[in-house]
Amino acid sequence: GENKNKICYFVHSTKELQYISPYNNMLVYMVKDGCFAIFSDNSWKKVSPGFEEQASSSSLKFIGVKDEYLLPSKVDCHYLYLEAKCALNFDEVKNSSFAVMIKQNYEEVFNIKWPENILWPGKESVQITATANAIDFFRFQK
């Protein structure tokens, strides 16, 4: 119906059920299913197993990045917090598959510059969500 793929939630017990439309690369936790999902290509996809344990552990820490950031070589998921605009560099990454989670600044919105050698669908690089505190999730294959 008209609410397909939308996120439904209760704001308060005195309010009716609310719906919002997701944007591309939006990451949400689905309480009913007990897992994270990402919205991409007009559908929801569950995030890979093991991510839930990482996200709920106290060891999950976002690394503050600005200017240029060289991703470390053997990390499966990189958690980046934007302190300013930043160019990402994948030259040292050794894993054949890895994920990047990018959290926008809480006060300002910053852009990132992706490495030139990423093959994006439609040959157009994807920009992160331009909303304070937004979180975007990307998975890359080498």
Image (cartoon, rainbow, N blue to C red):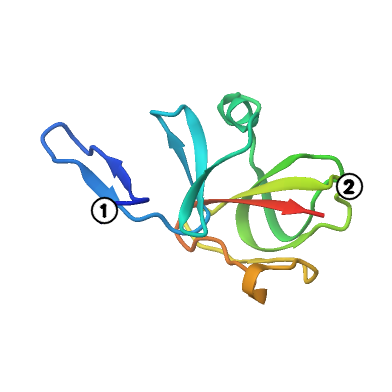
Percent x, y for residue 121?
64, 68
Choose between 113 and 2: the one closer to the eye. 2
Q: Which mark is residue 94?
A: 2
- In the rendered view, tell whether residue 38 sits above or below residue 108: above
Residue at 84% x, 45% y is: 95
Choose between 99 and 89: the one closer to the eye. 99
Q: Is residue 70 visible?
A: yes
As measured in the structure, the alpha-carbon distance from the residue carrying label 2 to the one carrying label 1 is 44 Å
Residue at 75% x, 46% y is: 98
Q: Earlier in the sequence, mark 2 or mark 1?
A: 1
Q: Residues within 10 Å of mark 1 (few under 14, many from 20)?
A: few
Percent x, y for residue 100?
67, 49
Q: Is residue 15 left or right of residue 87?
A: left
In the image as oriented, which residue stretches furthest toward the front?
1
Q: Residues within 10 Å of mark 2 (few under 14, many from 20)?
A: some
Q: Which mark is residue 1?
A: 1
Q: Is residue 53 left or right of residue 40?
A: right
Residue at 62% x, 61% y is: 84
2 or 1: mark nearer the eye: 1
Percent x, y for residue 130?
48, 63
